Image (cartoon, rainbow, N blue to C red):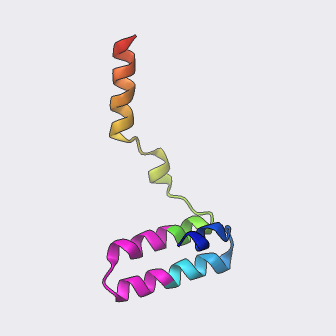
């Protein structure tokens, strides 16, 4: 999988990720397929607007503990 990631953000690499995802689904590896679909999208330059705005709870808690220490 590292080879596909290092191939760069072009259509052929995204197509390979997509085909890998399809094969992983057929094999029953749905978590692997989901990651491959995400990699296909990322290789194409797509990002989720929802994910880019999401606040991670661990980051919020870390920020709270820093302000409490000051």
Point out residue 2 in the picture as x, y percentages from the top left corner.
Answer: 56, 69
What range is drawn magenta here? 20-38
The quarter of the displayed image where residue 31 is located: bottom left
Q: Report if residue 50 lies within the magenta region.
A: no
17 is higher (above) or lower (below) than 51: below
10 is higher (above) or lower (below) than 53: below
Residue visible at 54% across and 59% down in the picture: 47
Left or right position of 55 against 18: left
Q: Main secondary structure of the magenta part?
A: helix
Left or right position of 30 against 54: left
Residue visible at 45% across and 52% down in the picture: 51
Q: Which residue is situated farthest in the front direction here?
A: 2
Residue visible at 47% across and 73% down in the picture: 36
Point out residue 45 in the picture as x, y percentages from the top left corner.
Answer: 62, 63
Point out residue 23 in the picture as x, y percentages from the top left corner.
Answer: 43, 87
How many numbered marks have been drawn onto this rendered protein structure?
Answer: 0
Residue visible at 35% across and 23% down in the picture: 64
- Choose between 49 and 60: the one closer to the eye: 60
Left or right position of 17 against 58: right
37 is higher (above) or lower (below) than 23: above
Q: Report if residue 28 lies within the magenta region.
A: yes
The quarter of the displayed image where residue 60 is located: top left
Point out residue 69 in the picture as x, y percentages from the top left corner.
Answer: 36, 13
The quarter of the displayed image where residue 30 is located: bottom left
């Amino acid at each position: 999988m590292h080879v596909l990631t290092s191939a760069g953000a072009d259509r052929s690499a995204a197509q390979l990720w997509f085909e890998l995802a399809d094969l992983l689904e057929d094999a029953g590896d749905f978590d692997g397929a989901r990651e491959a679909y995400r990699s296909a999208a990322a290789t194409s330059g797509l990002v989720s607007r929802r994910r880019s705005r999401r606040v991670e709870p661990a980051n919020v808690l870390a920020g709270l503990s820093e302000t409490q220490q000051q």
